[in-house]
Amino acid sequence: MGLFKNLFKSKNPNSKRYRRDMAKHLDGRSLKCVLEKKEDGIEEVIGHSGAIIVKGDEILVYASQDVLLRTKIVDLSAWELLSLEGVVITAPDLEHGGQVRQLIAYYKYWRNVEN
């Protein structure tokens, strides 16, 4: 049974396994820009040129030479955009007193071009 568990990813976004898998998937992603969705529905650019980093049991969104979000992986709620150009992260921010924040991080586009 354990063999099949490792072959297939969890589809339940509320499970710890799904959150760990999503954190592993996001680890090391380069970011073009990061937006924050405010309570009034307005999206504001808060950072450029960064990365998503997993350190131990925490995930960090780093951009513009600053940590924009630091949260525990078990508190993470994340899903990729349908275009696969970025990710929406909703989580309590340990850097800013535990306030729940919603960030939209767009991946940096890259591809290998061989001559």
Image (cartoon, rainbow, N blue to C red):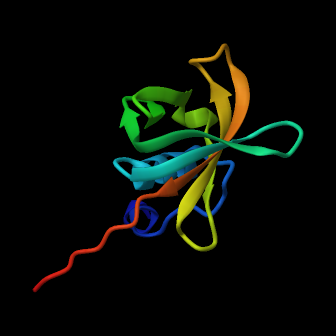
Q: Quadrant of residue 35?
A: top right
Q: Would you identify the image quadrant in which residue 39 lies?
A: top right
Residue 44 placement (x, y as % from top left) = 70, 42
Residue that sits furthest to the bottom in the current view: 115
Q: Residue furthest top?
A: 97
Q: Is residue 107 above or below residue 83?
A: above
The single residue placed furthest to the right in the displayed view is 40
- Of 89 and 65, nearer the camera is 65
In the image, 86: left or right of 101?
A: left
- Residue sticking out furthest to the left: 115
Q: Nearer the viewer, residue 9 or 49?
A: 49
Quadrant occupied by the N terminus = bottom left
What count of labels does the image hold? 0
Going 38% across and 47% down the picture, which residue do you hit? 27
Q: Is residue 74 left or right of residue 110?
A: right
Question: Image check: 18 left or right of 32?
Answer: right
Taking depth in this image into account, of 87 and 41 the one nearest to the observer is: 41
- Estimate the x, y position of residue 32 in percent, counting from the top left: 45, 53
Q: Classify the position of the C terminus by image quarter.
A: bottom left
**With respect to residue 96, does 7 lie above or below?**
below
- Image position, residue 67 (x, y; %): 47, 27
Q: Residue at x 53, y 66 (%)?
A: 85
Q: Residue at x 63, y 34 (%)?
A: 75
At x 53%, y 56%, the residue is: 106
Q: On screen, 10 above or below 47?
A: below
* Image quadrant where residue 72 sits: top right
